């Protein structure tokens, strides 16, 4: 009975800080994904719920609930919170357009930034700004940022790029999709990519705090690896801009000083 109760209370939390989509808008799609994943894993129908949160505080609160056994998270969130929630990767998402890995690019006003020291007094704006450890030690691992650099989260990247072009002392750290759109901007000539990250995972699906029993963990991982290769999982994944899952390859991240 306890095992059945535990299964009924299992929740997959989709954490998407800074990205578009209200929880209500996304709910049908995450429900569809959970249903397809449960079927692929051979779990009892209805044994996994799914929730979506586009904020960091909301995502953190949801992962803190005892029913949160799985988390789908962008890599910046993983870097920032994997220790707190003992996130153990099961699979790495292959995302439509970006693939399974992406390079984050730091964009400045053309000719303004020539190296890390040039960023003294600057603010770095990014959809990943809620994850300063990711910004400093993953995305910009090759640069030692000046102590007075500020890192702030924003979902208004286009506005940030306009401010950069106008000469404000800010730079923007862009993900693959945002960087790919740069050449289409009317003021693109006023913007310059000054450095980029190594290839980093786009998103991870992980277990939370060892709350999922080993047998169910293994069956769910196997289900993820075959979803996207036929059956109901294809449509469920497509609605979330996912193509497939692969075994995770997580780069080591140096601890923050």
Image: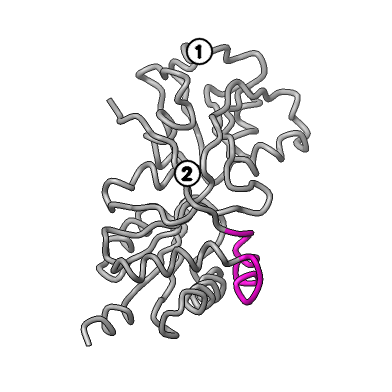
Q: Nearer the viewer, residue 103 or 161?
A: 103
Give the Cα separation between the discs numbered 2 and 1. 33 Å
Q: SS class of the residue under badge 1?
A: helix
Q: Name the residue tied to disc 2.
A: 249
Tell which residue pokes out farthest to the bottom in this image: 1
| Residue 115 percent across, percent down from the top left | 53, 13
Residue at 33% across, 47% down: 81
Taking depth in this image into account, of 226 and 89 the one nearest to the observer is 226
Answer left or right for 11 relative to 22.
left
Q: Is residue 20 above or below residue 80?
A: below
On the rendered image, what quadrant is the C terminus found in?
top left
Residue at horizontal 35 percent and vertical 18 percent from the top: 147
Binning the other alpha carbons within 10 Å of mark 2 as few (below 14), some (14 to 19) or many (20 upward) gives some
Position in image of residue 164 (x %, y %):
61, 27
The residue under the point 47% across, 77% down is 38
**Would you say residue 231 sits in the magenta stretch?**
yes
Instruction: State whether residue 28 is above or below residue 222.
Output: below
| Secondary structure category for the residue under label 2 | loop
**Residue nearest the viewer, comparing 178 with 229:** 229
Instruction: Please state the horizontal and vertical placement of residue 212, each as a whole percent of the image.
Output: 30, 67
- Residue extent of the magenta highlight: 228-244
Tag 1 residue: 118
**Percent x, y for residue 222?**
48, 65
**Quadrant of the image containing the N terminus:** bottom left
Crowding at dot 1, Cα within 10 Å, few <14 / some 14-19 / many 20+, comes out as: few
- Mark 2 and mark 1 lie on one chain; the one further toward the N terminus is 1
């Amino acid at each position: 009975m306890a095992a059945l109760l535990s299964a009924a209370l299992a929740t997959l939390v989709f954490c998407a800080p800074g990205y578009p989509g209200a929880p209500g808008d996304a709910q049908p799609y995450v429900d569809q994904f959970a249903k397809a994943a449960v079927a692929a894993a051979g779990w009892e129908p209805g044994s996994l719920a799914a929730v979506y949160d586009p904020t960091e505080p909301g995502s953190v609160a949801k992962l803190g609930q005892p029913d949160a056994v799985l988390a789908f998270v962008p890599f910046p969130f993983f870097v920032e919170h994997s220790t707190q929630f003992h996130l153990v990767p099961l699979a790495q998402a292959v995302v439509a357009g970006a693939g399974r890995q992406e390079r984050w690019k730091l964009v400045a006003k053309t000719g303004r930034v020539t190296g890390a020291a040039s960023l003294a007094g600057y603010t770095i704006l990014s959809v990943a700004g809620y994850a300063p450890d990711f910004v400093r030690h993953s995305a910009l691992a090759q640069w030692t940022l000046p102590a007075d650099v500020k890192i702030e989260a924003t979902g208004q990247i286009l506005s940030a790029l306009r401010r950069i072009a106008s000469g404000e002392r800010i730079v923007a750290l862009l993900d693959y999709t945002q960087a790919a759109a740069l050449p289409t901007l009317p003021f693109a000539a006023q913007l310059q990519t000054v450095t980029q990250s190594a290839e980093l995972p786009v998103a991870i699906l992980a277990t939370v705090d060892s709350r999922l029993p080993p047998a169910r963990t293994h069956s769910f991982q196997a289900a993820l690896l075959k979803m996207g290769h036929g059956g109901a999982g294809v449509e469920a994944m497509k609605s979330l801009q996912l193509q497939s899952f692969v075994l995770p390859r997580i780069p080591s991240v140096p601890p923050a000083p």
